[in-house]
Image: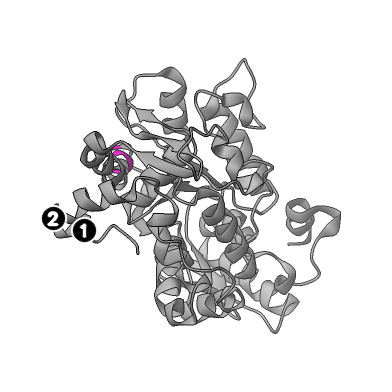
């Protein structure tokens, strides 16, 4: 196995199996070996690392000393992991935490300078894109580079459209399917938080429907927009009351629309996980169990199985690091009007308001 070992890992070949990132194993193509050669190869691995052995269970493989393992798959490419998440649902936080958690669990993640690598309107943000190709070609190059390094490519996207007729989107969809991409949908459970955030970021209308506009604490129009996140400016949302119900419904519909689209495209995973559950441990230790359960669902949807106690152990270091979300009275300028409309609606609307 020495030539294979050096070819796979190069001059910096690990001295034992224990030094290999978990994500390397699926790309070793051991499942195409004959039974005799497979037994021989596993025996050599055990001799090289007597304290560590390869464990194959059902449809996955892992290290004996780790509960984390990736789903088994065929071919030389490690399937990429896609997190579908619209704006104002904590996408930057979720992808950072996902990569950190995977790394803590022993899954090597390919380093990316940007998370936005599949924007069909801005394909140049993908580091592998070139004008003579398309986003599908770019993603194939990226996943191959990551797989050759024994790493998994983790990225996010605002949406995937199974109903598209655009060339760039069709090419991207086909590439993601061909590479057996694993997916998860992350959303906010409270649509009022999404609406408030988008207004404060200056997304004042969607599909021609007015949402409202950002104002300062005195009610004057504010144009800080997305920069408020860096400057710390106190910006509130002046919510359009005439279209409140319509805008809340629009925000709520996203996860099911994306789940249906992923199903139509034939992509794996498709589980819906909520942002509030993923970060609730940061507010209180009482939420550690529920937060760990949410992360286990997210990782499972991306093709990674892990014991929940391992997840809890990794999350403990962040317990109590952030305060709970602010009451909506601190975020919405015309809070009285919003409260009146919500209180007169169904119970699901009444529960949106945070005091």
Residues at marks 2 and 1 touching, judged by CB atoms closer than 8 Å: yes
Say if the magenta span includes residue 208: no
Residue 12 place in picture, x, y as percent: 84, 58
User: Residue 346: which numbered mark, if any?
Assistant: 2
* Residue situated in front as seen by the camera: 40 or 204: 204
Give neighbour class at mark 1: few <14, some 14-19, many 20+ (Cα, 10 Å).
Answer: some
Residue marked by disc 1: 350
Residue in the image at 45% along x and 61% along y? 326
Image: magenta residue range: 260-264
Q: Is residue 315 above or below residue 184?
A: below
The answer to whether one can see residue 178 in this image is no
Say what secondary structure mark 1 lies in.
helix
Which corner quadrant holds the C terminus?
A: bottom left
Q: Is residue 119 above or below residue 334?
A: above
* Residue situated in front as seen by the camera: 51 or 302: 302
Gap in angstroms between the C-alphas marked 2 and 1: 7 Å
The answer to whether one can see residue 136 in this image is yes
Say what secondary structure mark 2 lies in.
loop
* Residue situated in front as seen by the camera: 108 or 60: 108
Give neighbour class at mark 2: few <14, some 14-19, many 20+ (Cα, 10 Å).
Answer: few
Say if the magenta span includes residue 262: yes
- Left or right placement of residue 90 versus residue 338 in this view: right
Residue in the image at 52% along x and 56% along y? 94
Quadrant in the picture for residue 113: top right
Residue 201 place in picture, x, y as percent: 49, 38
- Left or right placement of residue 147 versus residue 94 in this view: right
Q: Spot the residue most to the bottom.
A: 51
Q: Is residue 331 above or below residue 107?
A: above
Quadrant in the picture for residue 206: top left
Residue 172 place in picture, x, y as percent: 47, 30
């Amino acid at each position: 196995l020495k030539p294979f070992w050096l070819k796979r890992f190069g001059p910096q070949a690990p001295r034992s199996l224990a030094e290999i990132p978990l994500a390397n194993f699926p790309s070793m193509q051991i499942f195409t070996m004959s039974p005799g050669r497979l037994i021989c190869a596993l025996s050599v691995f055990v001799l090289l690392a007597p304290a560590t052995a390869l464990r194959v269970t059902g449809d996955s493989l892992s290290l004996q000393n780790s509960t984390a393992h990736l789903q088994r798959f065929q071919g030389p490419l490690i399937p990429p992991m896609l997190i579908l998440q619209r704006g104002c649902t904590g996408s930057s936080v979720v992808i950072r935490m996902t990569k950190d958690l995977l790394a803590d669990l022993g899954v090597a993640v390919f380093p990316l300078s940007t998370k936005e690598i599949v924007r069909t309107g801005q394909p140049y943000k993908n580091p592998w894109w070139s004008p003579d190709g398309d986003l599908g070609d770019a993603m194939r190059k990226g996943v191959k580079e990551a797989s050759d390094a024994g790493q998994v490519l983790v990225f996010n996207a605002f949406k995937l459209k199974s109903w598209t007729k655009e060339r760039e989107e069709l090419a991207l969809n086909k590439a993601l399917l061909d590479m057996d991409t694993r997916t998860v949908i992350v959303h906010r459970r409270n649509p009022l938080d999404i609406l408030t955030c988008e207004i404060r970021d200056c997304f004042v209308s969607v599909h021609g429907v007015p949402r409202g506009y950002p104002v300062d604490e005195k009610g004057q129009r504010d144009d800080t927009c997305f920069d408020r996140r860096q400057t710390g400016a106190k910006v509130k949302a002046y919510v359009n009351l005439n279209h409140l119900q319509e805008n809340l419904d629009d925000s709520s519909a996203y996860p099911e629309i994306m789940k249906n689209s992923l199903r139509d495209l034939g992509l794996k995973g498709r589980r819906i996980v909520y942002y509030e559950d993923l970060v609730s441990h940061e507010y209180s230790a009482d939420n550690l169990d529920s937060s760990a359960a949410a992360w286990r669902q997210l990782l499972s949807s991306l093709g990674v199985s892990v014991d929940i106690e391992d997840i809890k152990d990794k999350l403990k270091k962040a317990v109590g690091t952030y305060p709970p979300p602010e009451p909506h009275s601190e975020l919405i300028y015309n809070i009285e009007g919003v409260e009146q409309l919500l209180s007169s609606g169904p119970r699901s609307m009444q529960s949106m308001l945070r005091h």
